[in-house]
Amino acid sequence: MNKVITISRQYASGGRMMGKLIAEHYGIPFYDNDIITIAAKESGFSEKMFEKAEDKAHNSLIYSIAMGMNVFGAQGYSQDVVNIDDKVFLAQSSVIRRVAEEGPCVIIGRCADYVLKDICDSVNIFCHADINQRIKRAIEVYGMSHAKAEENVLKVDKKRANYYNYHSDRKWGRADNYHLSIRTDPLGIEKSAEIVIGYIDSIGKAKDEN
């Protein structure tokens, strides 16, 4: 299998659960909010600051800095030119790169596909689903009202898109940013996870043959 699997996902598409099933199948670490917890502990920033940074993302050239420096301003960059939200992102990126270097794992969200694009051999997955099915899942899994579920689906998708577009030179959800884009609602999350596992295994076999 490939060293690292990153999963970006629309809200309530089941991407997190799919990632967990994939990690369990391979017996490898699964990172979601753990990235924030580790980054907060190491950087001294509170976990709340990481959450707020996601809410405030717009457009930036910070990706060019993030790919070449750590949170403490390596490679000649002054901390003065990087605002607090970007420092939070850099702290998070540092953790993502380190856990990827430590060994095979599954990483959910956090622009991991972009952060790792030049440093490791990863398989990047985008998980999506029909909006009505996602609203239904938000109601059933998260216990929201229909109105709240619909609001959250749209709001969180927008937040994730802004965050990804802000910290990279790519557009969130574009198929050409990922190795595989999979729609989960026709087959369900477990079957979708099986398909992704088959795809990952096929990539590994193709590389072995070459």
Image (tube, rainbow, N blue to C red):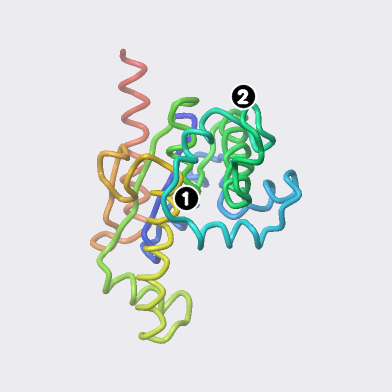
**Figure quadrant of the N terminus:** top left
Q: Which residue is drawn at 31% across and 50% down?
A: 173
Which residue is depicted at the point 37% across and 63% down? 158
**Secondary structure at numbered mark 1:** loop
Judge from the rendering whether residue 183 lies leftward or rightward of residue 97; answer left or right. left
Packing grade of label 2 (10 A; few <14, some 14-19, many >=20) is: few
In this rendering, the answer to whether 116 lies above or below 51 is: above
- Residue 191 at x, y percent in the picture: 32, 54
**Which residue is the site of mark 2?**
75
Which residue shows up at 48% across the image and 76% down it? Answer: 142
Q: Residue 168 location in percent, x, y?
A: 41, 41
Per the image, label 2 sits on a secondary structure element best described as loop
Nearer to the camera, 37 or 31: 37
Front one among 96 and 80: 80
Q: Nearer the viewer, residue 158 or 188?
A: 158
The residue depicted at 33 percent of the width and 28 percent of the height is 203
* Residue ID for mark 1: 109
Instruction: Indicate whether 48 appears above or below 82.
Output: below
Spatial distance from mark 2 to mark 1, Cα to Cα? 26 Å
Name the amino acid, label 2. Answer: Gln
